[in-house]
Image (cartoon, rainbow, N blue to C red):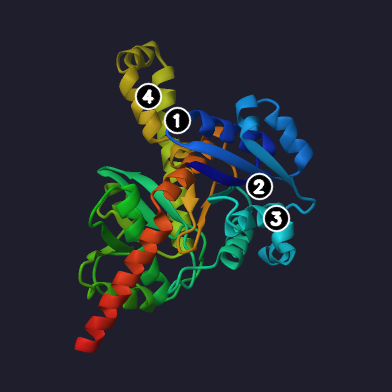
Amino acid sequence: MITTLAIDVMGGDGGAAVVVKGASLALEKSVNHKLAFIFFGHQPKILEELQKFPNLAACSSVVHSDIIVTNDMKPAVAVRAGRKSNMGMAINAVAMGQADAVISAGNTGAYMALSKIILKTLPGIDRPAIPALMPTMKGKAVVLDVGANIECNTDNLIQFALMGEALACQILNLESPSVGLLNVGSEELKGNATIQEAYQFLRTLSDFRFSGFVEGDDITAGKTDVIVTDGFSGNVALKAIEGAARLIKSIITHSLSSSWLGRLGYLIGRSQFKKLQAQLDPRLYNGAVFLGLRHIAVKSHGGVDAIGFANSIDVAIQMVHKNLVHKIEQRLNLMNARIALESRRA
């Protein structure tokens, strides 16, 4: 079975050079899956980069677009361009069954708007959410939303909780992930009306491990497997944690290189330092699925390098082969049926 990936080449700060090299790295890494790529964007630039990677070129095709969605383009303008733009064409390839997933490092607002229009949302989902996989003291945790929805209502948070639970089952291999709501305190009376209403609803659900409210420092502590919040708070938390990781890495690097004793310590514990460096490398956590859509769409960070973009491609491949969309739809249907049954009994 060949997994075909639609790639928006022109998105992101690095453009075609980073995206095409990232695809080449993903191809080298993917020994268990046969891959094919469809690149969308400025054809001459794409072909120029593909010449550097013969193996990638052999399993790729290029679709030219004169309309390029830029990082500063307003989502409304991108929506008007629709399926004629590089991003719209890439998304539409998935909707038409020509590709199994789409990946872009481009304009997040435009990507989300076009994906929602072209790919459609699952029944019962009002807004797609962007999750992030974060390292914790106990392993890894799913945090959502991290930027797609700046303002959320109660229903949005409840839907995020159910989708986040389904995602954690697949990528963390957990039968019953715990789910918490991000708040300014763990006490039941803390938070605004929206988060309070979501709390009261989620705590009543059967067959759902609800951990109540969690605070910012609980994310990296690994208190819960899934942390639910609005896109504003989630994005701030994500960027703060990424910044803290870079700070720690910088402090350690400086300490180990500032004296002969530090360099000696590095030589002694080299393997452990490399392991720590890998755990703190945000590129290895790059790639977030737009949860709630009928097809797989993965968002890569705009400032990512080739290694990070390759990881976002790997995320797309995993989600396709794990049949994530179907699993989320099953979970939502099951939960909605139980909610309806409990409402009738009440």
Residue type for callout 3: Asp
Q: Does residue 200 show up?
A: no
Q: Quadrant of the C terminus?
A: bottom left
Q: Does residue 129 show up?
A: yes
Question: Looking at the image, is mark 2 or mark 4 earlier in the sequence?
Answer: 2
Residue labelled with disc 1: 31
Residue labelled with disc 4: 274
Residue occupying the point 19% across, 87% down: 345
| Gap between marks 2 and 1 measured at Cα | 27 Å
Residue type for callout 1: Val
Q: Nearer the viewer, residue 182 or 198?
A: 198
At label 3, counting other C-alpha atoms closer than 10 Å, the crowd grade (few under 14, some 14-19, many 20 or more) is few
Residue occupying the point 38% across, 14% down: 263
Question: Looking at the image, is mark 1 or mark 3 earlier in the sequence?
Answer: 1
Residue labelled with disc 2: 11
Q: Nearer the viewer, residue 24 or 60?
A: 60
Residue occupying the point 45% across, 30% down: 31
The answer to whether 123 is drawn above or below residue 172 in the figure is below
Residue labelled with disc 3: 72
Question: Looking at the image, is mark 4 or mark 1 earlier in the sequence?
Answer: 1
Question: Looking at the image, is mark 2 or mark 1 earlier in the sequence?
Answer: 2
